[in-house]
Amino acid sequence: MRISPLLADLRHGGLPGLGADTLAGTITAILLIPQALAYALLAGLPPQIGLYASVLPVIAYALLGSSRTLAVGPVAVAAVMVSSALTAYAGDDVDKYLTGALLLSALTGVMLLAMAALRLGWLANFISHPVLSGFTTAAAITIIGTQIPALTGLSVARDALPFELLTHLAEQWRQINPAELAWGVAALMLLVLARQPLVKTLTRVGVAKNTAAILSRTAPLVLVIIATLLSTLLDTEARHGVRVVGAIPQGIPLPTLGFIASDGWMALLPSAAMIAVVGYIESISVAKVLAFRRRERIDPDRELLALGGANLAAAFAGAMPVAGGFARSMVNFDAGARTQLAAIVTAVWVALGAFFFTGLIAALPKSVLAALIVVAVWQLIDLHHLRLTWAFDRTDGVAQVVTIVGVLVLGIEPGLLLGAGTALALFLYRTSRPHIAVVGRMAGSEHFRNIRRHPVQTFPGVLLLRVDESLYFANAPFVENELQTRILETPNLRAVVLIMSGVNGVDSSGLEVLTGIERVLAETGVALHLAEVKGPVMDRLAKTDLLRKLAPAHIHLSAQDAVNAVVGGPQG
Amino acid sequence: MRISPLLADLRHGGLPGLGADTLAGTITAILLIPQALAYALLAGLPPQIGLYASVLPVIAYALLGSSRTLAVGPVAVAAVMVSSALTAYAGDDVDKYLTGALLLSALTGVMLLAMAALRLGWLANFISHPVLSGFTTAAAITIIGTQIPALTGLSVARDALPFELLTHLAEQWRQINPAELAWGVAALMLLVLARQPLVKTLTRVGVAKNTAAILSRTAPLVLVIIATLLSTLLDTEARHGVRVVGAIPQGIPLPTLGFIASDGWMALLPSAAMIAVVGYIESISVAKVLAFRRRERIDPDRELLALGGANLAAAFAGAMPVAGGFARSMVNFDAGARTQLAAIVTAVWVALGAFFFTGLIAALPKSVLAALIVVAVWQLIDLHHLRLTWAFDRTDGVAQVVTIVGVLVLGIEPGLLLGAGTALALFLYRTSRPHIAVVGRMAGSEHFRNIRRHPVQTFPGVLLLRVDESLYFANAPFVENELQTRILETPNLRAVVLIMSGVNGVDSSGLEVLTGIERVLAETGVALHLAEVKGPVMDRLAKTDLLRKLAPAHIHLSAQDAVNAVVGGPQG
């Protein structure tokens, strides 16, 4: 494994893309800075924590990661998971909350590195796309809910679930601060207008489509600057009681290790594990999509390592957990990034911003950042995917709906666990009741298909059965019962042919079923034949008494061979 | 569903087997009475509780069950599970312990009835045979461990794990009561001699083999009677400090409902669920084996109902949980039982015993009952099965070893959960990394097999791939990666044929993989073909964009058809 794909890129390719990377990194920084401030607030942390998470961690990923265009930093879903974990952990204790954030970053990093070391990246596959999509949708709805207080001037407990929030709002709506609401709604409207409407208008007046899209992406930063200036001019904090970001310490703190002495490690471990898995899946999904567009490959283990390193860097930089952001990486890619040099340019811009400009945004109303969050996460709500999933596979659809309802009703982490558990349980349930078909031969071929679906030739006294699942403990009693039933139903039976093309594995319970069926059949003078047994299955059966009884006369490469053997000769 | 299979049997068949059933029921009672006393002690309960569990519950099962020969009552594994659950629940509080036993019976009954009502009997299939066998073996070892104190006169905490027990014994061996040890060892030796050696001797002197086997089964009761007489004569309790059974209340108590007011319901629910599942699996396994011998069928849902009823009856009779016993049912069957009338005869004998004879066994040394338990459960230790499992399927072997070690180190319930969880995790891991074969055509056939295993014909520029697993979320990334690798490795590729004979299902993650592969291939001018797609999979794919792109030209019934389409004409 190379130590740094980026350094290898630079050594082999020289710096031909330096200009492109600088431009892309700059555009990404313009998008990232306001998002970083906003997602820190979403996590319940001071806004500068988001900036800290956008410098060292970004550089760490740039040096270690196998994706050339993934843009790492604070992301909305991880931020709300941080908020949910820390509200339970620290309550109103501000110091404990902040220390907890660093612990979470460190633990997330350690979990990812451990998964890399133990080659456990495949564990993440057990959270299916439908579950992840449902989780993201429900998390986005939860996030929008958490921003309603900031947008309206009301205060609601940080850990309120969406439906609790609605009742709170219904009770308190008279206390809405009209000025705060005005700031929020105005910001929301501007951000919405700056998306599709602005791009359309700009292209209509002759601006290139790509340029228009990039200009649209500058809207959040422009909004932050204008809102800060306007708020200072109007003195809106003092005059209208609008809550503002307040004084932010300038610069970037030196690495701190004080949090290591904290005793919250065990308490935060489960949350960190979930942030690690969700962050990893999100990052690798984006990275794969982007790599695929340029015919590059992503190394999953390398990504675990790089994200682990980025999160450890976050902990030492005094920042919140990070992951690859979808929108941000898309912008980076579309803006022409060729290597992770672009990310380093981004990090330099964020650092400069932290050193020179953060002091200036003290007057920025928090409701403007809330509007920014709402518009950013609105795009994560994907009901279209839910419709598609539901139409294609009811089981996946159920798992997705359970995840959404679970997150909205039970909260972020229990909802995710419930959804992932439901998907697994439904898969297991399905494999425990496999499809079993009685088959016959398609006219003029050696191919055998279900007699209920195709016009096929059957052979009197010969029962051809195809089991469409591996034989394993959870379906052994079901398969045994089904086979017995089909056998009892067939008149004048003289041979049973089990077509094993769909049987990808046989465990010892499956072997018991086959052995039992053979014994029953033998006692009544009926022959059992096996056909199309796969190599790996045959390897295992080879050692058994069952095969010693059947082989070689009753074991056939193809169903056709079996029929020839049973009814005599290839005439069928 | 018939209300009572037994009544139906009697109505349709008259009473032709009355004599056979009476004899079988009597012989079963001779085996059951000493076992009932012993297993109650094993559960940490007064011996008469075992007798109570052998009357009403037996009658309830006899009326409701679908097995004609299953003999229900206290069983060793359930007894040790009761002991483990109640020691944690009640500690040294004798009243709470006894009330807890009734609660456990009631909860076990309710769980079984709920499983029957919700048709959840299949859940029990998720405890595989290897796990159950390992569990039984480890439980038997645990049980033998728990009897060592009773056999030696030492006292050790009831909830000591086997390895803790050994250290206790090593520390305390000087306090062994020689008289108690003598009773125990003598009883052990007599019981062992009464098995194979006695049967062999009797048959050698001309006794019929069946009669000899039945005589051998009377040994425990004969031993109990002789030991009681001898102990009374020697006054062994007063003279040698040997612990005896003591006064047992005569008769059978009226149904009690006082335990319902207890507040232990929630605390005991998990243990009851496990006793219900283990008891159900054990019972239905024996019932199936016996029914199969007479070509009868067992109705799993009916068994849930009947065992549920039997356990509710146990609760109301003031008794411990019950299940179908293996040895006991075998004896009943071998002794010629035709219907559950035999069980009613057994129950009548146990009730008579409880009314007239229990007062007489006060002087019976407890170490004799301990010897009885040890000899009975010794046969449950099945290392032969472990060797077979290990040889056939390493995965099952690992699950079995984990179960055994788990039960011995962590205890009965955690060990069972760990084992069942391990079996599931290993199954899922296996399905997450499926076998994928490059195949070619067997000479002179239309059958396609792995090019690494068989001498097959291949077609230049055509990649024939067979995926040996359903495509689902947990293996989607792995399959995608494998397919991409094989595709990149093949020179001058013009067509890829995916042979879907082993793909028993495709969920939405699997569909994403197929769609993605199709898109990559299409962009490089390579055609994707699907062959041998099963009916249920095709039904689902039919609605998708993927199939609209591929069908009908690229969808083939057989691999041969696909090859014909790709290389032109049936000449191949």
Image: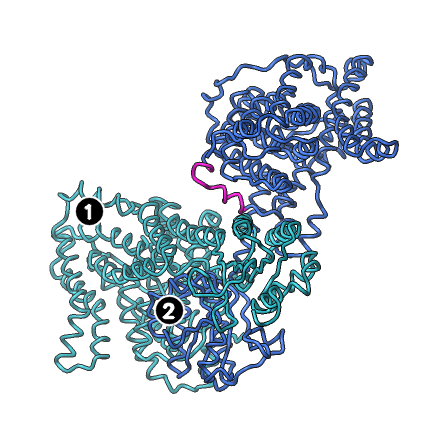
Chain colours: A blue, B cyan
| In-front residue for pair B288/A20 | A20
Quadrant hosting residue B357: bottom left
For disc 2, the marked residue is B286
Relative to B381, is A539 on the left or the right?
right
A3 over B38 or under it: above or below = above
Image location (x, y in percent) of residue B183: 15, 57
Can you say which quadrant of the picture contains the C terminus of chain B?
bottom right
Residue depth check, mark 2 versus mark 1: number of the one nearer the observer? 2
Can residue B362 be seen here? Answer: yes
Q: Chain of mark 2?
A: B
| In-front residue for pair B144/B516 | B516
Image location (x, y in percent) of residue A16: 62, 27
Neighbours of disc 2 within 10 Å: few (<14), some (14-19), many (20+): many
For disc 1, the marked residue is B154
Image location (x, y in percent) of residue B270: 45, 50
Q: CA distance from mark 2 to mark 1?
A: 36 Å
